[in-house]
Amino acid sequence: MNNLIVQEGSTAVALPAEYMAQLAQDAKDTSAVETPSVSALSFKSGILAYQGQAVPGNAMQCVAVDTAFERCYYDGPYDPNKIKNPVCFVLSSDGEDEAPHGNSSAPQSTSCTGCPKNEWGSAGEGRRGKACKEIRRIALIPTDKLQSPDDILASEMVMAKIPVTSVSNWSNHVHKANALHSMPFWAVVTKLHLKPHIKNQFEVCFDVVGPISSIEALEAIKKKRLMAQSFLLAPYDGSAEEEKPAAPAKETKASKKY
């Protein structure tokens, strides 16, 4: 009797299409209730840092795997020594039909459309901005994980939350990848770097390093994209309690290199 259930190295599953569709739905449902571990880049004080260590040169080369849209409203002014979760937030893969997430501790409206916190000038203190910030989440993998398709699939994804003042830089990067190489953003190597900004202290910038030419690597990245949305759409825990502030990053010889 052959007890071999899965053939090593095989990706084909010989099951009826209807059964496969049910498995796909079950996978989607189970993934929806599991919150993945999220490692994030830090831009605090204009220093690019990962896991508490400053990234040398304030820049890293990476592949941007996928993106998600976030809107977040905080109750009270920003205090770097008293970091809190947003009391109202929205997460979506396409930026459409947005409404507060169920974990929001104080939803400001039933929909982002018509919400007073989503109006220009609602930021207060004479500012023209919105009280609700529209940022972008990007799932990244460092280019040192591009050695093989297996490395890509096994690599940890890192989340970068791009501030509203730099979201246009990301949009321009997407268009530039298309204009230069006729490639989507996930099929090129990206240089993410921080530079000083006279008004916003710093801005997050993106450069196209070059296209990824390996079909095997691109196919692995496409599979990685299927994993990215649950990572990108991981919600806040629903509490407005303070989160522990990250320690200031210092660039040292032991800093993680990319």
Image (cartoon, helix red, strand yellow):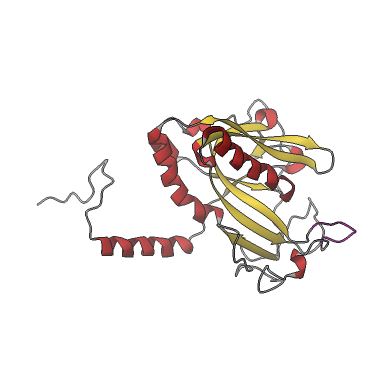
Q: Residue furthest top?
A: 253
Residue 179, quarter of picture: top right
Please tell me whether residue 124 belongs to the stretch shown in magenta.
yes
Horizontal side of residue 113 vs 156, given as left or right:
right
From the image, give the main secondary structure of the stretch colored magenta: loop
Seen at 64% across and 30% down, the residue is: 255
Q: Residue furthest right?
A: 126
Seen at 59% across and 42% down, the residue is: 174
Is 52 placed above or below 137 here? Answer: above
Residue range highlighted in magenta: 123-129
Q: Nearer the viewer, residue 124 or 120?
A: 120
Quadrant holding the C terminus:
top right
Horizontal side of residue 56 vs 46, given as left or right:
left
> Is residue 183 visible to us here?
yes
- Where is residue 161 shown, x and y percent of the image? 65, 48
Horizontal side of residue 143 vs 21, given as left or right:
right
- Where is residue 242 shown, x and y percent of the image? 72, 59
Q: Residue furthest bottom?
A: 110
> Is residue 36 visible to us here?
no
Q: Nearer the viewer, residue 34 or 191?
A: 191
Is 254 placed above or below 94 here? Answer: above
Is 106 placed above or below 211 here? Answer: below
- Where is residue 117 shown, x and y percent of the image? 76, 66
Seen at 39% across and 37% down, the residue is: 150
Please tell me whether residue 101 belongs to the stretch shown in magenta.
no
Q: Residue furthest left?
A: 1
Q: Nearer the viewer, residue 31 or 129?
A: 129
Across the whole image, how many numbered discs are drawn on residues?
Answer: 0
- Where is residue 86 shown, x and y percent of the image? 70, 61
